[in-house]
Amino acid sequence: MGTQIVHIEKPCLLLLGGKYRVQMGTQIVHIDKPCLLLLGGKYRVQMGTQIVHIEKPCLLLLGGKYRVQMGTQIVHIEKPCLLLLGGKYRVQMGTQIVHLEEPCLLLLGGKYRVQMGTQIVHLEKPCLLLLGGKYRVQMGTQIVHIEKPCLLLLGGKYRVQMGTQIVHIEKPCLLLLGGKYRVQMGTQIVHIEKPCLLLLGGNTESRWEPR
């Protein structure tokens, strides 16, 4: 499929071009481009040297651009990624465990160009792209509600290039993309207009290096 190489060890469904209505629980997702529907069980997905274990069913979006309609959310992805549907997931990447209530995109190893409005972000490490809607993310005892799309950076170090900005993060954090957010942490309400990093519980070491 272009120059995309993907190895899957477990059975899956290859959904060809066209629009799909995938009902998993009460979740409805429309996909324009071909994708892989990974059924229940654990998978070893080798994309480069990337290994990912998934317990719940999900969609593996292959190379190309997608129009994912979840509510009124439109997202264009250039690199393959995993679309995690409604339900709770145990995503083991190293020793990182994340539970999600709302659908999101798990961006695998490699660099991405994510166009959300005019926002361009390049990522070297795997991360979660949280789509529109509210999330209950349990990382330890941390609860976060997000109204706008954002990036949940999992454990490990990242090199995030936003313009000429380079950031290295050791602990999980939320990368809030352009737009306004209503972040409820306890009773705290914060509105952000510019991209920023929301550091979650734990000790976080951030290094901001101008390129």
Image (spheres, rainbow, N blue to C red):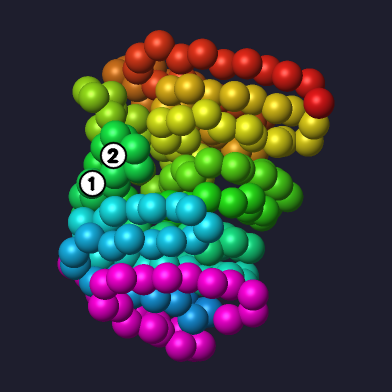
Residue 10 sits inside the magenta stretch: yes
Residue 29 in the image: x percent, y percent? Answer: 38, 71
Whether residue 198 appears in this view of the structure is: no
Residue under label 1, please give it: 90
Judge left or right: residue 142 versus residue 148: left
Whether residue 210 appears in this view of the structure is: yes
The image quadrant that residue 138 belongs to is top left
- Which element carries disc 2, helix, strand or loop? loop
Residue 58 in the image: x percent, y percent? Answer: 32, 64
Crowd band around label 2 with a 10 angstrom C-alpha radius: few (<14), some (14–19), many (20+): some
On screen, residue 135 above or below 27: above
Crowd band around label 1 with a 10 angstrom C-alpha radius: few (<14), some (14–19), many (20+): some
Which quarter of the figure is the N terminus placed in? bottom right
Magenta residues, start to end: 1-29
For image coordinates 26% across by 78% down, the residue present is 11
- Which element carries disc 1, helix, strand or loop? loop
Residue under label 2, please give it: 98
